[in-house]
Every structure is written in structure tokens, then in C-alpha cells.
Image (cartoon, rainbow, N blue to C red):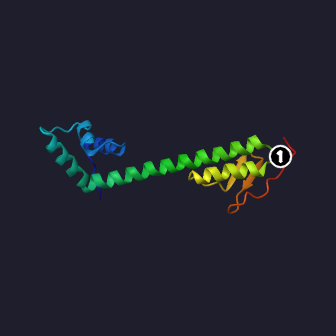
Amino acid sequence: MKDKLTAQQALFVEYYCSGMTAKDAYIKAGYKNKSDDAVRVSASQLLTNPNIRTTIDERLNEIRQNIDDQIKLSTDRAFATMLDLLGSEMDFARLGAAKYILEIAGHKAPENINIGGKVTWTVEGVDIGKFPKSNDS
């Protein structure tokens, strides 16, 4: 069973996971040591504490998942905006080029896009597929 972290340890974890060095996170969390070397050693010891290490790993996984979710949401919005701008007279070459650029940048095209509950676009492999023309507004 994982022991609960102290308030100071929890602060250290948050500061460390936000990108600070262990030394800076240690100081910002309110730990006190007389020398710079003592701060480094103490901060390093905190990183080897199993409860702190587990909490850091869990927090970093949460941060990574949040970033992945934000990237997916941004990608979905970008594709939906492209489809909206292109309208029912789809320019497959422009959409294909935009899709290619986004994929080069590391963004996977969404499998389905729903615009206003009316249009669904499905990506099959690298083909864009057919985009149904909608006559209803």
C-alpha cells in the first residue's frame, strides 16, 4: 500500500513534474539545507523515495495523457475546420495536402469527423475516401 506523501513532498512532486530541476523543486517546496551540495543530495534522495517516485511516475503519465488528449482534440478541430471551409464542393487535392502536412507534423487524421451532426468523413488508410455532398442545410 502506498503511503501518503507529506504536504512538502507533494509540493516537491508538483514542482518537479512541472519541469523544475530536483534541486529547484526541493527549494521551492520549502525544504531547507545549509549548502548547495546538501540541497542536491537531499533532492536526489527524495527522487529515490519509492512513494515519491511512484507519485512522480503517475503524475507524469497524467500529464502525458492530457497532452495526447489535447493534441487529438486540436487535430479533430483542424480537420473539422478544413471540411467546413471546403464545404460540399470538396477539393480533394487541398484536403489531401492538408492531411499530409498534419501527418508529417505527427498528427493522425481522425477516423470520423462530425460537423453539426450532418456530415461524417471516414479515413480509410491513407485514402481520404468519398465525401458525401449534402443538399440539406
| Quadrant in which the C terminus appears | top right
Residue 113 in picture, x, y percent from top left = 70, 50
* Amino acid type, mark 1: Glu
Pointer 1: what residue?
A: 89
Locate residue 89 relative to residue 77 in the image: left or right: right
Q: Looking at the image, which residue sits at the far left?
A: 34
Residues 60 and 2: in front is 60
Is residue 9 shown above or below 3? above
104 vs 10, nearest the viewer: 104
Quadrant of the rendered image containing residue 136? top right
x and y, in percent, of residue 42 in the image = 18, 47
Residue at horizontal 43 percent and vertical 48 percent from the top: 63
Q: Secondary structure at mark 1?
A: loop
Extreme residue toward the bottom, this view: 125
Please determine whether, in this image, residue 124 is positioned above or below residue 77. below
Give the quadrant of residue 20.
top left
Rendered location of residue 51, percent (x, y):
27, 54
In-image side of 106 versus 51 (left or right):
right
What residue appears at the point 23 percent right and 54 percent down from the top-left corner? Answer: 49
- Between residues 117 and 119, which one lies in front from this camera angle? 119
Is residue 125 visible in the rendered structure shown here? Answer: yes
Residue furthest right as drawn: 135
**Which x, y percent locates residue 27?**
23, 38
**Residue at 76% across, 58% down:** 129
